[in-house]
């Protein structure tokens, strides 16, 4: 491990560093329409670069995106964590789930755990989430997480809403 | 699995894993025309994504591109090492030198050291360099490293020439290996006079 990515356990999930064997699930997600709100769809090579970028992000920033894995069997179910690429105004809490994992409240569980960990260990408290205006499900999740709409913004030249999470202790 | 990017010391250089503080140097070159044969010039976001990917590549492949530093001053001169994104037919030895550091043999010295590491410590039996046919400086460097154009080898996308490096056995104690050492010695000390070789 280039960076000692911490492991977080929740009731049903393990948040851990991405592993090489997670790439297949990631590439499949990035190739699908499901990734349309997070820069996709993209081909396998672009997905590969993105996968490497996420690992390098931990080294460059000291925080990043975890793989959300099924606590029972280790299957990768999606990703959640902090993103602060060039062009970001501040660190963002992001999440996405792969198709099979949807509809069980897992994104909520993962995002909540990641957010709490970031507040306690990375000094990332009261962070934002950038959400595409058409991404109804993520908007709903942001609301469930106790985040508030802050303003209309822009990310990489596209319109984007900025949602602000509560600081630790005030979280839902 | 704990994994540290190895550090390699050469006569003039120190090769280290890319770190956050080296990013501005990378960005300057990849935002410029200098990067035109490496997929550039890139905008700010693209440059950052590629830089982070350079680091993540180490994690995914177990090898990658080092940042080339001056051994004494720590200044960065460019990058060299191994590169194999998805879609690359084979493992590549690659290099890029910042424009201000060109012409001093740093790419030769770094690529030679990287190749030695891959051959000796990772057991590579071969390696290629994918080079834009218009990138004459890099073609020349591949040839100085003893690589030869391999018309049989698969290319990345048909727009690149494949240069195949000499295999470990072909390189060991060879004239090309001594030639590279001498060339580096000349760069390091312009008054260097080799001994034991007939120059006329």
Image (cartoon, coloured by chain):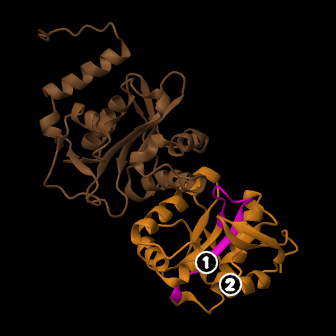
Q: Residue at x 41, y 39 (%)?
A: B96
Q: Report the magenta residues as a range.
A: A82-99
Is B146 a magenta residue? no
Residue at which label 1 appears: A37
**Chain assigned orange:** A
Q: Residue furthest bottom?
A: A103
Q: Is residue B99 above or below residue B33?
A: above
Residue at which label 2 appears: A134
**Chain assigned brown:** B
> How far apart are labels 2 and 1 at the CA level?
8 Å
B162 or B84, nearer to the observer = B162
Rate crowding at label 2 as few (under 14), some (14 to 19) or many (20 or more) other CA atoms within 10 Å: few
Q: Earlier in the sequence, mark 2 or mark 1?
A: 1
Percent position of residue A126, x then y: 82, 66
Disc marking residue B60: none
Q: Would residue A146 appear left or right of B137 to someone viewing this image?
A: right
Whether residue A73 appears in this view of the structure is yes
A53 or A65, nearer to the observer = A53
Q: Is residue A130 above or below residue B37?
A: below
């Amino acid at each position: 491990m280039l960076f000692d990515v911490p492991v977080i356990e929740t009731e049903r999930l393990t948040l851990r560093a991405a592993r090489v064997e997670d790439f297949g699930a990631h590439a499949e997600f990035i190739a699908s329409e499901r990734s349309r709100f997070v820069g996709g769809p993209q081909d396998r090579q672009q997905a590969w670069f993105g996968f490497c970028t996420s690992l390098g992000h931990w080294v460059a920033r000291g925080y990043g995106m975890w793989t959300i894995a099924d606590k029972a069997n280790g299957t990768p179910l999606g990703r959640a964590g902090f993103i602060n690429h060039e062009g970001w105004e501040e660190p963002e809490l992001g999440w996405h789930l792969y198709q099979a994992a949807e509809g069980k409240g897992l994104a909520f569980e993962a995002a909540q755990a990641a957010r709490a960990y970031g507040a306690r260990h990375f000094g990332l408290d009261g962070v934002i989430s950038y959400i595409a205006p058409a991404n109804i499900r993520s908007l709903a999740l942001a609301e469930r997480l106790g985040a508030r709409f802050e303003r209309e913004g822009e990310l990489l030249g596209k319109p984007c809403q900025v949602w602000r999470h509560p600081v630790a202790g005030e979280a839902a | 699995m704990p994994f540290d990017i190895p550090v390699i010391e050469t006569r003039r250089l120190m090769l280290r894993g890319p770190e956050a503080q080296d990013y501005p140097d990378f960005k300057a070159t990849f935002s410029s025309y200098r990067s035109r044969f490496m997929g550039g010039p890139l905008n700010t976001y693209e440059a950052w994504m590629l830089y982070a990917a350079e680091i993540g590549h180490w994690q995914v492949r177990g090898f990658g591109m080092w940042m080339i530093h001056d051994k004494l001053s720590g200044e960065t001169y460019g990058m060299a090492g191994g590169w194999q994104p998805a879609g690359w037919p084979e493992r590549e030895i690659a290099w890029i030198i910042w424009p201000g550091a060109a012409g001093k043999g740093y790419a030769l010295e770094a690529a030679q050291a990287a190749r030695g590491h891959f051959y000796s410590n990772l057991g590579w039996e071969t390696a290629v360099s994918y080079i834009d046919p218009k990138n004459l400086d890099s073609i020349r460097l591949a040839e100085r490293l003893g690589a030869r154009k391999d018309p049989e080898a698969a290319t990345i996308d048909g727009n690149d020439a494949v240069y195949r490096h000499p295999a470990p056995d072909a390189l060991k104690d060879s004239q090309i290996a001594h030639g590279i050492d001498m060339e580096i010695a000349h760069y390091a000390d312009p008054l260097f006079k080799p001994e034991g070789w007939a120059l006329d």
